[in-house]
Amino acid sequence: MDSQRDLGPDITAIMNKPAYEHAQWGLLEIDPESGRVIHSRYPDQFFMPGSTIKLITISSAWHALGPDHRFTTPVNELGHRNGSTLTGNLALVAQGDLTMGGRTKPDGSVDFTPIDHTYANDIPGATLTPEDPLAGLDEIAHQVRDSGITTVDGDVVIDPRLFTPPALNPQPTPLIINDNVIDLLTTPASPGQPAQLSWRPQVAPYQVTSNVRTVEAGGTTDIQVTASPDGTRITLSGTIAADAKPTLKISQIQDPNAFGRTALIEALGRAGVTVTAPPTGPNPDGTLPASYTGTPQAAAFVSPPYHEYAKLILNVSHNLGANLALCNMAVSRGSKNCFDGFPVIHDFLTQTANVDPTQFQMADGRGDVPVDRVTPTGLNQLLAYWLRTPDADAFRTSLPILGVSGTGALFCTTNCPAKGKVFAKPGTIIGFDQLNQQFAINAQTYAGYLEADDGHLYTFFVGVNGAAAPNIQGFFDVNDDVDEIAVILQQEACAERGAGRPRHKAITSARRSLPRIVRP
């Protein structure tokens, strides 16, 4: 159904802007308590979803694994002990733990910032969490020492056989340290001077060289990152303005297993455990046994509960974590093929959520391949399912909250009546139209819950496919238009529930102030 008559003048005015001349809008808002449709525009048509598809991926993983599931990564002894010496190898058996302790706060929750470091090369304003990305390996190393081992007369091996890394971008791996990236933070000095560089995690044989120069205040900040084919020699070049904030970039870890092996050997050294094998070099996984039956366990690292990982993935649109969820689900079914996570999703939709799976098309976990599609009806049905479960509040509060948390914190921050009242996942697909020399916004979408002042919840989807923008500022405006429609809907919900307030006013005060930030 294509119906604009029930959208109201404010929403209609947004949808009729010149940027959307060739675009298509979809909108569906439902009161799940009664099933009443509040607003509807193309509810049963496919839309490119961007990261709103993570609602499907993470809903399925939440159900398949359980919100309290913890990943336990063991370290086994392969050999025999003589006093405090292990003659043989230590094997860390990777278990698909997304963070390996690198974001865990003292209270056990998982830390994140509005713009995650994994987006640092693409989006300005990415920042680091304060936690040590090697914290999990350090804990393992201390457990090994506490078990009585002070010398490993042999090697350390990463066992990566949990699943086969799939052909997805980013590619999940059984062992992940710091999201498989090196963080590179450049801080300006005085004009004309070399900029200051800090980087982490510092693990051999990785080396970083910076040729970034500080230029005058107001000058151009443009930092480029290059790396050797194996990723271990990283160079930064370019300029940073003297008045610029510290600028974060990242470089990919090409061999997570070799990196993890060296990082664990170095962690063991810090804990007082000597390993006789050279610390750098390839991971010797050819020495791994067929089974660990009968082998003693020297250590085991236990992750936070999965609902904390779900909150991280949904709040920062963590692409690696979303693709990893496919692998986690496949492993839960006894498969090493990550694409066997899709039958798990299919079963969840049909057997548990009672949602027709043909309302979705998926070929990854993050929403970035041409196949991916959703209908507004399908997402609304999935969101309504959660409201019928004991985890309703936990799932809803795992989403970005408008003006408060995750990517939602980038909009509606001041003077915004809907602040803290929209719990929703955004999605973006953007490219550059070479023919017309403008930005093509393939998708800007938003799906989740609207909360009225009395606590009543509505489900909604709003999104646009096929918009165009002459410059990056125009893209930010599209981003804001989608958010603004959500704010209008939330204010209408308040009015409908008898809050006695105007339906919608002064939403322009909620729009982003420059410099604007793109939400993943």
Image: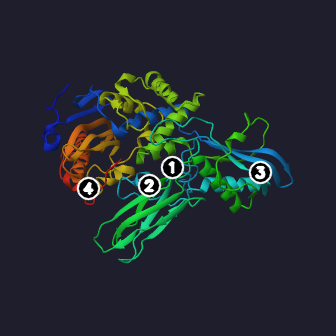
Residue at image coords 37%, 40%: 51
Q: Secondary structure at mark 2?
A: helix
Which label's residue is closer to the chain start, 4 or 3? Answer: 3
Marks 3 and 4: in contact by CB < 8 Å? no
Distance between mark 3 and mark 2 Cα atoms: 36 Å
Kindly report the distance in space between the C-alpha atoms of the residues bearing marks 1 and 2: 9 Å
Q: CA distance from mark 4 to mark 1?
A: 29 Å
Residue 486 to residue 135: above or below = above
- Identify the colour scheme used: rainbow
Q: Which residue is mark 2?
A: 117
Separation of disc 2 and disc 4 at Cα?
Answer: 21 Å
Where does label 1 land, which residue?
Answer: 179
Q: Earlier in the sequence, mark 3 or mark 1?
A: 3
Looking at the rendered image, the disc whose residue lies closer to the viewer, 2 or 4, is 2
Q: Secondary structure at mark 1?
A: helix
Residue at the image point whose x is 57% and y is 61% from the top: 202
